[in-house]
Image (cartoon, grey):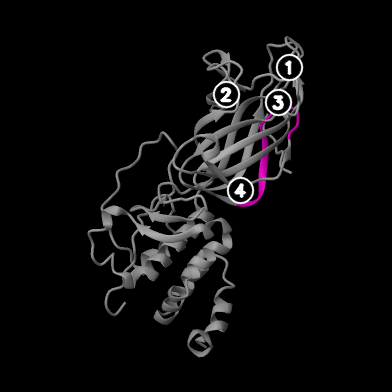
Amino acid sequence: MDFVKNLDTDTSLLILSCLDDPSDLVHASAVSRSWREFVIRYGLSKNLCFKLFHQLNCVDRVNEESSWSSSSSLMDETKLPEREHMAFTFLAKGCTSSPIRSCIAEAIIASSTDNFPEESILETLDERYKIRGTPSYWSSSGHHNTSVPETLLYKLKGDLCVVTEFSIHPFQAYFQRGKPIYSSHYVRFRLGHLVNKSQENNNYVWTYTSQQFPMVQENRLQNFKLPEPVVCIGGYMLIEFLGRVQTQEGDGLYYICVRHVRVMGRSLGKSFRLVDLDESGKFGLNVVRSYCDPKEMGEEVVEQRPFRQMSTREFLNFIHEEPIDDFEYGWHEEEDGEEEDDAESDGEV
Protein backbone atom coordinates (compact mmCIF):
# COMPACT_ATOMS: atom_id res chain seq x y z
CA MET A 1 0.00 0.00 0.00
CA ASP A 2 1.25 3.49 -0.86
CA PHE A 3 0.74 5.02 2.58
CA VAL A 4 1.83 8.48 1.39
CA LYS A 5 -1.22 8.55 -0.90
CA ASN A 6 -3.63 6.67 1.33
CA LEU A 7 -2.83 7.91 4.83
CA ASP A 8 -3.20 11.38 6.26
CA THR A 9 -0.20 13.70 6.23
CA ASP A 10 0.55 13.48 9.96
CA THR A 11 0.65 9.69 9.90
CA SER A 12 2.90 9.63 6.84
CA LEU A 13 5.23 12.15 8.49
CA LEU A 14 5.34 10.05 11.63
CA ILE A 15 6.34 6.95 9.63
CA LEU A 16 9.02 8.63 7.49
CA SER A 17 10.42 10.51 10.48
CA CYS A 18 11.46 7.15 11.93
CA LEU A 19 14.19 6.96 9.29
CA ASP A 20 17.45 7.93 10.97
CA ASP A 21 19.94 7.32 8.16
CA PRO A 22 20.39 9.74 5.21
CA SER A 23 20.63 6.80 2.79
CA ASP A 24 17.24 5.46 3.91
CA LEU A 25 15.63 8.84 3.31
CA VAL A 26 17.16 9.01 -0.17
CA HIS A 27 15.74 5.54 -0.87
CA ALA A 28 12.32 6.71 0.27
CA SER A 29 12.46 9.79 -1.97
CA ALA A 30 13.32 7.55 -4.94
CA VAL A 31 10.28 5.25 -4.56
CA SER A 32 8.04 7.45 -6.66
CA ARG A 33 7.44 11.05 -7.70
CA SER A 34 4.80 11.48 -5.00
CA TRP A 35 7.15 10.19 -2.30
CA ARG A 36 9.92 12.49 -3.48
CA GLU A 37 7.59 15.48 -3.50
CA PHE A 38 6.39 14.57 0.00
CA VAL A 39 9.95 14.30 1.39
CA ILE A 40 10.88 17.65 -0.17
CA ARG A 41 7.67 19.49 0.70
CA TYR A 42 7.92 18.69 4.40
CA GLY A 43 11.71 19.15 4.67
CA LEU A 44 12.44 15.66 5.97
CA SER A 45 16.12 15.79 5.02
CA LYS A 46 16.49 19.05 6.93
CA ASN A 47 14.67 17.64 9.94
CA LEU A 48 16.87 14.52 9.89
CA CYS A 49 20.00 16.69 9.77
CA PHE A 50 18.81 18.64 12.83
CA LYS A 51 17.86 15.41 14.57
CA LEU A 52 21.31 13.88 14.09
CA PHE A 53 23.23 17.08 15.00
CA HIS A 54 21.23 19.59 17.01
CA GLN A 55 24.00 22.19 16.59
CA LEU A 56 22.84 22.59 12.96
CA ASN A 57 19.53 24.06 14.13
CA CYS A 58 21.31 27.39 13.76
CA VAL A 59 21.17 27.14 9.94
CA ASP A 60 18.55 29.68 8.92
CA ARG A 61 19.01 29.56 5.13
CA VAL A 62 20.83 27.77 2.33
CA ASN A 63 22.84 29.90 -0.09
CA GLU A 64 24.33 29.18 -3.48
CA GLU A 65 27.90 29.72 -4.54
CA SER A 66 28.12 33.26 -5.92
CA SER A 67 29.46 32.01 -9.25
CA TRP A 68 26.12 30.31 -9.89
CA SER A 69 24.04 33.47 -9.56
CA SER A 70 24.09 34.14 -13.30
CA SER A 71 21.86 31.12 -13.93
CA SER A 72 18.22 32.18 -13.83
CA SER A 73 17.02 28.59 -13.35
CA LEU A 74 19.10 28.24 -10.18
CA MET A 75 17.59 31.43 -8.82
CA ASP A 76 14.04 30.21 -9.38
CA GLU A 77 12.40 30.39 -5.96
CA THR A 78 10.13 27.47 -6.84
CA LYS A 79 13.20 25.24 -6.71
CA LEU A 80 14.27 26.37 -3.22
CA PRO A 81 12.68 23.42 -1.32
CA GLU A 82 14.40 20.96 -3.64
CA ARG A 83 17.76 22.69 -3.26
CA GLU A 84 17.40 22.65 0.51
CA HIS A 85 16.53 18.97 0.35
CA MET A 86 19.68 18.21 -1.65
CA ALA A 87 21.89 20.43 0.51
CA PHE A 88 20.75 18.93 3.82
CA THR A 89 20.93 15.40 2.43
CA PHE A 90 24.56 15.91 1.48
CA LEU A 91 25.26 17.68 4.76
CA ALA A 92 23.86 14.76 6.77
CA LYS A 93 25.81 12.30 4.62
CA GLY A 94 29.04 14.25 5.07
CA CYS A 95 28.57 14.57 8.82
CA THR A 96 28.06 10.83 9.24
CA SER A 97 30.10 9.11 6.53
CA SER A 98 33.06 11.20 5.39
CA PRO A 99 36.52 9.98 6.53
CA ILE A 100 37.68 10.75 10.06
CA ARG A 101 40.95 12.66 9.93
CA SER A 102 43.05 15.16 11.83
CA CYS A 103 41.13 18.45 11.97
CA ILE A 104 43.64 21.02 13.25
CA ALA A 105 44.65 23.58 10.62
CA GLU A 106 46.77 25.96 12.69
CA ALA A 107 47.72 27.00 16.20
CA ILE A 108 46.49 30.49 17.14
CA ILE A 109 47.64 31.48 20.63
CA ALA A 110 48.44 30.23 24.12
CA SER A 111 47.38 31.95 27.34
CA SER A 112 51.06 32.13 28.34
CA THR A 113 54.44 30.89 27.12
CA ASP A 114 57.57 30.41 29.18
CA ASN A 115 60.20 30.80 26.46
CA PHE A 116 58.99 32.22 23.17
CA PRO A 117 59.30 31.07 20.41
CA GLU A 118 61.19 27.92 21.45
CA GLU A 119 58.28 26.70 23.61
CA SER A 120 55.35 28.21 21.69
CA ILE A 121 51.99 26.61 20.87
CA LEU A 122 53.28 25.90 17.34
CA GLU A 123 55.41 23.10 18.79
CA THR A 124 52.26 21.10 19.68
CA LEU A 125 51.36 20.51 16.03
CA ASP A 126 54.17 17.99 15.48
CA GLU A 127 54.02 14.69 17.35
CA ARG A 128 57.75 14.08 17.18
CA TYR A 129 59.62 14.40 20.48
CA LYS A 130 62.55 16.22 18.90
CA ILE A 131 62.62 18.67 15.99
CA ARG A 132 65.94 19.98 14.73
CA GLY A 133 67.65 18.09 17.54
CA THR A 134 65.80 19.81 20.42
CA PRO A 135 62.68 18.75 22.40
CA SER A 136 59.44 20.04 20.87
CA TYR A 137 56.76 21.19 23.33
CA TRP A 138 54.70 24.12 24.58
CA SER A 139 55.34 25.36 28.12
CA SER A 140 53.21 27.72 30.16
CA SER A 141 54.71 30.33 32.40
CA GLY A 142 55.31 29.24 36.01
CA HIS A 143 53.03 29.98 38.97
CA HIS A 144 53.03 29.35 42.71
CA ASN A 145 49.23 28.95 42.60
CA THR A 146 48.23 25.49 41.33
CA SER A 147 44.72 26.66 40.36
CA VAL A 148 45.84 29.10 37.64
CA PRO A 149 44.46 27.66 34.34
CA GLU A 150 46.05 27.70 30.91
CA THR A 151 44.48 27.63 27.45
CA LEU A 152 45.52 26.73 23.90
CA LEU A 153 43.53 28.05 20.93
CA TYR A 154 43.43 26.34 17.51
CA LYS A 155 41.77 26.87 14.13
CA LEU A 156 40.18 23.78 12.60
CA LYS A 157 40.04 22.77 8.94
CA GLY A 158 36.86 24.44 7.79
CA ASP A 159 33.85 26.29 9.16
CA LEU A 160 32.06 23.00 9.84
CA CYS A 161 33.81 20.10 11.57
CA VAL A 162 32.25 17.07 13.21
CA VAL A 163 34.59 16.43 16.15
CA THR A 164 34.72 12.94 17.64
CA GLU A 165 37.89 12.82 19.78
CA PHE A 166 40.61 14.97 21.34
CA SER A 167 44.09 13.77 22.26
CA ILE A 168 46.82 15.39 24.37
CA HIS A 169 50.36 14.22 25.06
CA PRO A 170 51.87 15.79 28.21
CA PHE A 171 55.56 16.61 28.01
CA GLN A 172 58.17 14.71 30.01
CA ALA A 173 61.36 16.67 30.61
CA TYR A 174 64.05 14.01 30.21
CA PHE A 175 66.71 16.69 30.58
CA GLN A 176 65.61 17.54 34.15
CA ARG A 177 66.39 15.52 37.26
CA GLY A 178 63.67 12.96 37.96
CA LYS A 179 62.27 13.33 34.43
CA PRO A 180 59.12 15.17 35.56
CA ILE A 181 55.89 15.13 33.50
CA TYR A 182 54.12 18.48 33.34
CA SER A 183 50.47 17.49 32.90
CA SER A 184 47.37 19.10 34.43
CA HIS A 185 44.73 17.62 36.72
CA TYR A 186 41.90 18.09 34.22
CA VAL A 187 41.29 19.19 30.65
CA ARG A 188 38.21 20.67 29.02
CA PHE A 189 37.40 21.49 25.39
CA ARG A 190 35.34 24.28 23.85
CA LEU A 191 34.15 24.65 20.24
CA GLY A 192 32.86 27.84 18.67
CA HIS A 193 33.29 30.78 16.33
CA LEU A 194 34.59 34.31 16.00
CA VAL A 195 32.44 37.41 16.14
CA ASN A 196 33.41 40.41 13.99
CA LYS A 197 36.37 38.39 12.64
CA SER A 198 38.64 39.63 15.42
CA GLN A 199 40.74 37.12 17.35
CA GLU A 200 40.62 39.02 20.63
CA ASN A 201 39.66 36.89 23.63
CA ASN A 202 36.22 38.44 24.10
CA ASN A 203 35.21 37.95 20.46
CA TYR A 204 34.77 34.18 20.63
CA VAL A 205 31.41 32.51 21.15
CA TRP A 206 31.72 28.97 22.50
CA THR A 207 28.72 26.93 21.42
CA TYR A 208 29.93 23.66 22.95
CA THR A 209 31.76 22.95 26.19
CA SER A 210 32.81 19.42 27.11
CA GLN A 211 32.91 17.84 30.53
CA GLN A 212 36.13 17.98 32.52
CA PHE A 213 38.29 14.99 31.64
CA PRO A 214 40.89 13.84 34.21
CA MET A 215 44.45 13.66 32.91
CA VAL A 216 47.09 11.29 34.21
CA GLN A 217 50.71 12.22 34.81
CA GLU A 218 52.05 9.82 32.21
CA ASN A 219 54.18 10.23 29.09
CA ARG A 220 51.67 9.05 26.48
CA LEU A 221 49.04 10.33 24.10
CA GLN A 222 45.85 10.50 26.17
CA ASN A 223 42.61 10.19 24.19
CA PHE A 224 39.35 11.83 25.22
CA LYS A 225 36.41 10.59 23.21
CA LEU A 226 33.21 12.64 23.25
CA PRO A 227 29.98 10.85 24.26
CA GLU A 228 28.64 11.69 20.78
CA PRO A 229 30.04 13.55 17.76
CA VAL A 230 29.71 17.33 17.98
CA VAL A 231 29.50 19.79 15.08
CA CYS A 232 31.86 22.71 15.57
CA ILE A 233 30.14 25.77 14.14
CA GLY A 234 32.76 28.30 13.11
CA GLY A 235 35.95 26.23 13.25
CA TYR A 236 37.69 27.24 16.51
CA MET A 237 38.71 25.04 19.44
CA LEU A 238 39.89 26.06 22.90
CA ILE A 239 41.64 23.61 25.25
CA GLU A 240 41.52 24.48 28.95
CA PHE A 241 44.06 22.94 31.35
CA LEU A 242 42.76 23.00 34.92
CA GLY A 243 44.98 22.38 37.93
CA ARG A 244 48.80 22.21 37.96
CA VAL A 245 50.55 19.15 39.35
CA GLN A 246 54.28 19.50 38.66
CA THR A 247 56.89 21.93 39.95
CA GLN A 248 60.18 22.71 38.30
CA GLU A 249 63.09 22.08 40.62
CA GLY A 250 65.00 25.15 39.51
CA ASP A 251 62.44 27.78 40.60
CA GLY A 252 59.79 25.85 42.57
CA LEU A 253 57.00 27.05 40.24
CA TYR A 254 54.20 24.94 38.75
CA TYR A 255 54.12 24.54 34.96
CA ILE A 256 51.96 22.83 32.34
CA CYS A 257 53.76 21.49 29.27
CA VAL A 258 52.27 19.78 26.21
CA ARG A 259 54.13 17.82 23.58
CA HIS A 260 51.32 17.23 21.07
CA VAL A 261 47.63 18.03 20.51
CA ARG A 262 45.38 16.16 18.09
CA VAL A 263 41.71 16.52 17.14
CA MET A 264 39.97 13.84 15.09
CA GLY A 265 36.77 14.29 13.14
CA ARG A 266 35.14 15.05 9.81
CA SER A 267 35.91 18.39 8.20
CA LEU A 268 33.41 19.70 5.63
CA GLY A 269 35.30 22.89 4.86
CA LYS A 270 35.61 22.27 1.13
CA SER A 271 31.93 21.45 0.76
CA PHE A 272 30.18 23.99 3.00
CA ARG A 273 30.96 27.47 4.23
CA LEU A 274 29.25 29.67 6.79
CA VAL A 275 28.14 33.21 6.03
CA ASP A 276 26.75 35.99 8.22
CA LEU A 277 27.44 34.15 11.46
CA ASP A 278 26.16 36.38 14.27
CA GLU A 279 26.36 36.41 18.06
CA SER A 280 23.13 34.43 18.35
CA GLY A 281 24.74 31.61 16.37
CA LYS A 282 22.45 31.87 13.34
CA PHE A 283 24.15 31.59 9.96
CA GLY A 284 23.67 30.97 6.27
CA LEU A 285 25.00 27.77 4.76
CA ASN A 286 26.91 28.17 1.49
CA VAL A 287 27.08 25.02 -0.62
CA VAL A 288 30.23 25.12 -2.73
CA ARG A 289 30.46 23.87 -6.27
CA SER A 290 32.24 20.57 -5.66
CA TYR A 291 31.00 18.33 -2.84
CA CYS A 292 33.89 16.30 -1.43
CA ASP A 293 35.50 15.58 1.88
CA PRO A 294 38.33 18.09 2.46
CA LYS A 295 41.85 16.83 1.85
CA GLU A 296 44.55 17.16 4.45
CA MET A 297 46.15 20.56 4.82
CA GLY A 298 49.23 20.88 2.65
CA GLU A 299 48.09 18.40 0.04
CA GLU A 300 47.74 19.58 -3.53
CA VAL A 301 44.21 20.58 -4.40
CA VAL A 302 43.05 18.99 -7.63
CA GLU A 303 41.49 21.46 -10.06
CA GLN A 304 37.71 21.15 -10.09
CA ARG A 305 35.98 19.91 -13.20
CA PRO A 306 33.18 21.99 -14.74
CA PHE A 307 29.91 22.00 -12.85
CA ARG A 308 27.25 19.59 -14.05
CA GLN A 309 23.81 18.49 -12.98
CA MET A 310 23.36 15.19 -11.12
CA SER A 311 20.69 12.67 -12.01
CA THR A 312 18.67 10.64 -9.52
CA ARG A 313 20.60 7.50 -10.51
CA GLU A 314 23.95 9.23 -9.83
CA PHE A 315 22.57 10.51 -6.53
CA LEU A 316 21.68 6.97 -5.43
CA ASN A 317 25.04 5.66 -6.60
CA PHE A 318 26.74 8.37 -4.59
CA ILE A 319 24.87 7.52 -1.40
CA HIS A 320 25.74 3.82 -1.63
CA GLU A 321 28.84 3.43 -3.77
CA GLU A 322 30.73 6.59 -4.68
CA PRO A 323 33.50 7.60 -2.23
CA ILE A 324 32.47 10.87 -0.64
CA ASP A 325 35.90 12.47 -1.14
CA ASP A 326 35.72 12.19 -4.94
CA PHE A 327 32.29 13.41 -5.95
CA GLU A 328 30.99 16.53 -7.63
CA TYR A 329 28.10 18.27 -5.97
CA GLY A 330 25.28 19.60 -8.14
CA TRP A 331 21.73 20.73 -7.61
CA HIS A 332 19.28 18.20 -9.09
CA GLU A 333 16.65 19.63 -11.41
CA GLU A 334 14.30 17.12 -13.00
CA GLU A 335 13.55 17.20 -16.71
CA ASP A 336 10.00 17.52 -17.77
CA GLY A 337 8.42 14.08 -17.25
CA GLU A 338 11.40 12.70 -14.72
CA GLU A 339 49.49 8.28 15.72
CA GLU A 340 51.60 7.59 18.39
CA ASP A 341 53.00 3.98 18.22
CA ASP A 342 53.37 1.82 21.37
CA ALA A 343 53.21 4.83 23.69
CA GLU A 344 49.61 5.64 22.66
CA SER A 345 46.74 4.30 24.77
CA ASP A 346 43.12 5.09 25.40
CA GLY A 347 42.32 7.57 28.16
CA GLU A 348 38.64 8.17 27.44
CA VAL A 349 36.21 8.66 30.29
Residue 30, by quadrant, is bottom left
Give the Cα separation between the discs numbered 3 and 1: 20 Å
| Disc 1, SS | loop
Q: Which residue is mark 2?
A: 128
Residue under label 3, please give it. Answer: 219
| Tag 3: amino acid | Asn
Helix, strand, or loop for circle 4? strand
Up/down of 110 relative to 196, above or below: above
The residue sitting at 75% across, 29% down in the picture is 147
What range is drawn magenta here?
Answer: 215-229
Residue named by callout 1: 253
Q: Nearer the viewer, mark 1 or mark 2?
A: 1
Q: Earlier in the sequence, mark 3 or mark 2?
A: 2
| Residue 330 point in image, percent of width and height | 33, 60
Decide: is 333 above or below 34.
above
Neighbor class of circle 2 (other Cα within 10 Å; few <14, some 14-19, many 20+) is some
Looking at the image, is mark 4 or mark 2 nearer the viewer?
A: 4
**Residue 208 has which mark?**
4
